[in-house]
Amino acid sequence: MQIKNSLEISHKDVSLRNIRRSDAQAWYDYLKNPDVIRHTSWNLHNAEDLLAQFSLYESDEMNSPIRLAIVSKEHDSLIGTVGFHTISDINRSAELAYDLAPEYWGKGVMQPAALALCDWGFRQAGYNRIQATVLETNSHSIQLLERMGFEREGYLRAFRMVRGTPGNFWMYACLHPDIA
């Protein structure tokens, strides 16, 4: 599903837009970085491995995942992504996912991008719950979720395969402001 109107974020150097197939190589270029890989469950071998995802992101089917590009305002080049997967219309919920090129870590990019998408999810998509799972070893992502107001709900042992090995994850969630 593509978000028809771009979301405004409160960061002077970056903006959000729908992800494009032409972003695949830039996306893969930082996802293959060992510092990024160790914090994700991606199992990629080349940029073409990402192309199947784009058909899902371009779909208007109910519950299809959403992925936005975080781009440099100066060059419109992809530096990260933020989106929802495991969307459940019937439960009015979605799972937040994000990644960012290491040269932008610690520069205040991800929080406004993720908050803008979560706000859209609550106000436009009508979600009651947005959740996120994070590898137990990813302390920076844990800190980000907590700064965003997500609450830790539980420990998920062997929850998702991480390059052939069962990975342990923390479950975080944020509820619609009218429910919380």
Image (cartoon, grey):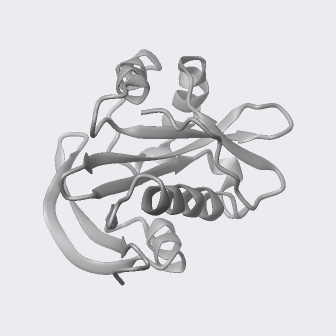
Q: Is residue 108 above or below residue 4?
A: below
Residue 22 lies left or right of residue 175; in this view the side is right
**Residue 88 or 28: which is nearer the viewer?**
88
Number of numbered markers: 0
* Residue at the image position 13 percent from the left and 66 percent from the top: 157
Q: Quadrant of the C terminus?
A: bottom left
**Residue 135 or 83: which is nearer the viewer?**
83
* Residue at the image position 56 percent from the left and 64 percent from the top: 115
**Residue 158 or 146: which is nearer the viewer?**
146
Residue 179 lies left or right of residue 29; in this view the side is left
Q: Quadrant of the N terminus?
A: top left
* Residue at the image position 19 percent from the left and 58 percent from the top: 91
Q: State the image quarter where residue 37 is shown.
A: top left
* Residue at the far bottom in the pictured view: 180
Residue 79 lies left or right of residue 19; in this view the side is right
Q: Position of residue 54 (x, y in %)?
A: 42, 23
Q: Position of residue 127 (x, y in %)?
A: 35, 60
Q: Is residue 136 above or below residue 50?
A: below
Q: Is residue 28 above or below residue 52?
A: below
Q: State the image quarter where residue 107 is shown.
A: bottom right
* Residue at the image position 72 percent from the left and 31 percent from the top: 77
Q: Position of residue 117 (x, y in %)?
A: 53, 55
Q: Position of residue 14 (x, y in %)?
A: 75, 48
Q: State the image quarter where residue 76 is shown.
A: top right
